Amino acid sequence: MLLLCGGATTLQLFISRGAGDSAPAWLMQQFTHAEWGGPFTCWDLVMPLFIFITGASMPFAFAKYCEKGGARWRLGTTWRVIRRVVLLFLLGMLVQGHLATARPEQMSLFCNTLQAIAEGYLIAAVVLLFGGLRAQIITCVLCMLSYWSLLRFVPYADQPAGLFLPDNNLAIYIDHLLQGPWQDGTHYSWILTALSFGALTLMGSISGSLIRAHRGRGAVARLALGGGTCLLAAAALQADTPLIKHIFTTTAVLWSGGWCIVLLALFHLLFDCCGAAAARWAFPLQVIGGNALLAYLLTEIHGPGGHSIWWGVAHPLFYGIAARCGAFAAPVFSLLSLLLLWGFLFFLHRHRAFLRV
């Protein structure tokens, strides 16, 4: 969330202004999405991390629902899940699907990370409602195998199976077929790809379950082993199926999920296993994470002028200061805007005010 709400833009601007043409191309590439089939970048990991983190929190949340809900906890949790899925789906349309225009001809049905989270959350929630860790692992593997098999071996229309072209693959064909004019016009797929989103969410829930059961270095070791295994599996599978984030091929799920698990192991080790002093360093990130949805909406919903809601807040305050910084005007404005956002989120954090769905 720190990267998405301005951290990446600020860092990129400072590097590009400071280093100019001497900035390493590989480094600057990390701030953009990879081209179709291109090398996975740091920016490509943001969306998988959101989906994975949603899953990682679910075992803790569902354990609380079970404890407080009594014998009928599944019924209450089911309604909670349905509400969240619907709200996330609608918020996704609000952010990128032009829902606020109230003009169906301008809307896109599937178009946003929040909707991918909703799909993955729904699949993982069904498993957690009625199964344990073994069910999570089996369903995760089945989701990946099913998606891989469909893309590799199922022909469609008059096309052969196994195509992985931007405008010609089974996942994007199904999106065009079912969404019609409400398809968002990009190369990203959403409907069949729900299997990948479900697998990635379940990777998170499996990791969260391991932390609940084996807190400390035992969990770190298991997570590191699991993440490393996923990365090796992705490297092996790439000989058969390309790593394409746009349609979340199974190779992309294993690669991004592997890095998510490794990062969770690293942060669990740093902030949960190294004492209270180390945990305090996590606080700036906790402020953002506690209201991640609000930060996302403020920085991603754009008004008529094409700027975000938060830009409209920060621009009148910092435009004059940034303009005095010459070539560094853009990075200074971006940094000040980010600091103001953090201050606002800190105020909400102190008053325990959190936006939840």
Image: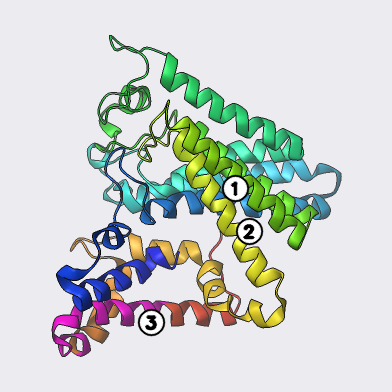
For image coordinates 34% across by 67% down, the residue present is 8
Q: Are marks 1 and 2 in contact (CB under 8 Å)?
A: yes
Looking at the rendered structure, the kind of residue marked 3 is: Leu
**Which quarter of the rendered picture does the N terminus lie within?**
bottom left
Q: Which residue is mark 1?
A: 227
Task: Name the spot of residue 314 as percent of width and height, x first.
Answer: 29, 79
Give the amino acid type for the residue marked by disc 2 in the picture.
Answer: Ala
| SS category of the residue bearing label 3 | helix
- What residue is rendered at 37% in x and 12% in y? 155
Residue 325 counted in the magenta span = yes
Report the magenta residues as a range. 321-341
Q: Residue flagged by tag 1: what amino acid is it? A: Gly
Residue 249 sits in quarter: top left
Residue corresponding to mark 2: 265
Residue of label 3: 340
Q: Which tag is nearer the camera, tag 3 or tag 1?
A: 1
